[in-house]
Each structure stands twice: as structure tokens, then as C-alpha cells.
Amino acid sequence: MAQLGVGGAGVNGGGGDAAGGGGVGGRGGSGGGGGGANNNKPEQLQPHPVKEQLPGRFVQTMRGIQGALIITACFQMVMGFLGLWRAVVRFLSPLSIVPYVTFTGLGLYYLGFPLLAKCVEIGLPQIVTIVFIAQYLPNYIKWKRPFFDRFALLLSVGIVWFFAQLLTANGMYNHRHSITQISCRSDRSGLITSAPWIYIPYPFQWGNPTFNAGEAFAMMAASFVSLFESTGTFFATSRYGSATPVPPSVVSRGAGWLGVGVLLNGMFGSVTGLTASVENAGLLALTKVGSRRVIQISAGFMIFFSIFGKFGAFFASIPLPIIAAIYCMLCGYVSSAGLGFLQFCNLNSFRTKFILGFSFFIGFSVPQYFREYYQLRSKCDLARASSGWFNDLVIVIFSSHTTVAALVALFLDRTLSCETEESRKDSGLKWWEKFSLYNSDVRNDEFYALPCMLNKLFPAL
């Protein structure tokens, strides 16, 4: 979920949607103004230039991103494979996990209706269609297998995408504002025509990576946020996958493998890091299919679409309001997974009520403050520091709803009478402690063992 990006002197890290595993179509598309004599289409993209034709500043920026990602990958692998992140996760209780996992989904609210409303004639039909197919239609049409649950996403996207094609072909957006065309048109910006048929990425395609301390620290802050948001996704996935609660050692191992992915991203010149896919956790709840084989096949499709650019651009041309409508449902599922941990807490305790209410309010309020000031480009007013990299570091961490809510809930839960027997029961620790060790439950091997003999090389200790 956290996107890692470096631009010039700064890094922008937020809650989001980064990608681990397939299941929801990608988002793409950009555009400019201007049009031809007959219609007002956005400016057509030029074919992808070769490296020698790119501006020098762009190449230098990409090299800086590569270097920052490589350093961040080392930090993340150390945190994961050496068990440092395991030590952090062991302090969690069901009470602190409630705002943690809830904000993993709620923290992406700005990717929901605010984007959907940019093209209401497409976004609203999508959200109505997917809710009707997934929730209402199974009550009237009975199948032996949960057909509508599993294929609600594909059916609804296909129907509304075809509807968007009809609106575009009929010229409904020809004379609309360029921003509206970018959001609504299914052929925006010449996305398909400008994509190459075949493009094979190779390591260090932008040249040797450059290393800058400021960029590296800011990117490491984004990686820290990514660890928090990915861990929340892990807990939500275990709930919807009918698995045992994720042992801290498994979470730490997953953080290490995320670091391996970030290293590959840095080597191959990607502009983002890697994080667990929040929307895929929601998709697991929607389809009720918790198989690793699905993710493996989806990963194969993603590799195929990244090499054969025309096919990838075809799916990337899905209008953004359709994706935003999907987020409204999938992120809602993830949020409800966090609320499900309330069953292990004592809701009659005023200690529990204070921790929940305070962490929820701060989880919304603090990131909103930092986002508003970041958009106004008043970064120096935030941390009262002259160091640009330190301002970026503070903004990245405190702009994440998940990170803020989790830190507040964890701090309060571990400091407010945490040693008394009554508070341990109120926090759900009596139930939670038996899942803190990997070998404490024989079912953990079934759920969390790595395939292809990797479990022997990377054991969950």
C-alpha cells in the first residue's frame, strides 16, 4: 500500500496501493489540454523514447530513485530476516490491532468516492453493479458454487467498461473539459497506441544508481510506513483466509521478502517500492478464495502484461472511477476485518474505549493536517527544520493513517496499566498469547509454510 517515490529533492510516501499480487486492474493515464479541429481529445502521448533521448534531469532522478530503493531494500531485509520487525509485532494485542487493521482499509478513503465522483456516470454504475451482483443477486439466483461472489468483480468491470466505451464512441466527452476526459474516456491520452508491443526491462537500465543520504532516509521512512501497512494487510488476510492469526515470525519473514522485492524494483528501475496489496485482501473477502495458486497465476499475468506493453496498456485504460468504485467495496472489507478483533476485547472497559476512540480520532486528524500542509508546499512549517530530507521523513510517516493509528494504539495499550490481569483480559492478550509462537499451533505449517523447499532456507523462528 505505501507508494515510495523520489522527485528531485524530496520523497513522497503515502498510503496507497502498491502492488503485491494481482486481482485488481492497474491504474494509469495522464493527459494534457488541447485537441484537434474536430474534437477535444487530450494530447496524444509520444512513443516511449530511448534513454539517449530522455532529458538528463529525468535520468538523474531515476538513478537517484534506484539508489534510494536499493538502500531501502537492505534496511527492510535486515528488519525482516533478522527478526527486528518480529520484536515489534509481538507487542501487538487484539485491542491495538483493531485501529491498526481498520485504518489499513479506511486510510485509503481518498482513493474511493473522491476519485469516483470525477466521472459519476461511470463510477456510480460500477459501485451499484458490483454491490448488486455480489450481495443481492445470490439471494435470488441459487448456484451450487458461489459463482456471483467469485466473478462479481470481473462481471461488473466488464459491463461498466463496455458502457464507458459506448459513451466514448458516441462522442459524449468530445467537448468536455480535459480533466473530465482523462477521468471518463476509455481511450484517453493514446495510452494503447504509445505503448510498445514488447519491452523487456533489464537491470540498471537508467545507468549506475546514485546514492544520496537525504533521499535514502526519506525512502526508508516510506519503507517504514510500508511495513506498517503491509502488516495490517497480513492480519486482514489471515482473518478472511480462515487461517490462524499470523505469528510475529511469519510477519517478519514477509517483511524481509518485501525487501527482496524492493531490491528488484530498484535494480530494474522502478519508481515505486513494494507493499502488500490492501485491495487483494478485500478481494479475498469478496471471492472467498484463499489459494496461493491464484496469486501465483496473477503474478504470471502481471509479468506478461509488463513485457507485452499493448496488452498491459489495454487493461490500464480502464477509467479511474471504475477502480475507485472497486476500492469502496474492497477497502471496506479490510476495515471490517479490523473491527472483527473487537470480539476479543472488553468493550465495557473505559480503558478500551479511550484507546479505541483516541487512536481512531488521531488516526484521521494528524494525517489530514500533514496532507493539507504538504499540498500547500509549506513543508518547512511542519517540522520547523531547515533540512529538506527531515521534513520529507516527517511528512511520509505522519501522512499515513495506518501508521499513526497503530503507533498511538500500541503506545497506549502498552503503557496504560498493561501489566495488570484485568487490563490483559480487556486487551484480549489472554487469547492472543497462544499464537505468538510459530510452533504453538500445528496448523501454522499448513497456512504459512513456504513452497519449493524455501521453508528450510527461510524458517519462521
Image (tube, rainbow, N blue to C red):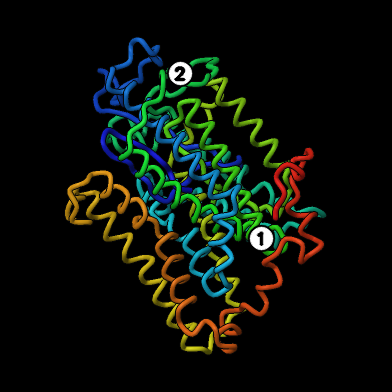
* Distance between the alpha carbons at the discs numbered 2 and 1: 38 Å
Up the image or down, 348 lies above or below 458; here it is below
**Nearer to me, 261 or 46:** 261
Q: Residue, x 24% and y 55% (percent of image)?
A: 372
Characterize the local packing of mark 1: few (<14), some (14-19) or many (20 or more) Cα atoms within 10 angstroms.
many
Q: Which mark is residue 205?
A: 2
Would you place residue 89 above or below residue 204 in this image? below
Q: What residue type is labelled 1?
A: Val
**Could you tell me which residue is drawn at 63 percent across and 56 percent down?**
237
Q: Where is residue 369 in the image (x, y as percent from the top left)?
A: 26, 60
Query: Which mark is drawn over residue 311?
Result: none
| Secondary structure beneath label 2 | loop
Kindly identify which numbered label has been placed on residue 246: 1
Image position, residue 98 (x, y; %): 53, 70
Give neighbour class at mark 2: few <14, some 14-19, many 20+ (Cα, 10 Å).
some
The reply to whether the C-beta atoms of the residues labelled 2 and 1 are less than 8 Å apart is no
Looking at the picture, how far across and down is residue 204, in whole percent? 47, 21
Q: How many marks?
A: 2
Q: What residue type is labelled 2?
A: Gln
Where in the figure is residue 255, as x and y percent of width and height? 57, 48
The front one of 348 and 331 is 348
The residue lying toward the viewer, choosing from 342 and 406, is 406
Q: Earlier in the sequence, mark 2 or mark 1?
A: 2
Residue drawn 42% across and 77% down?
Answer: 357
SS type, badge 1: loop
Can you say which quadrant of the picture contains the C terminus?
A: bottom right
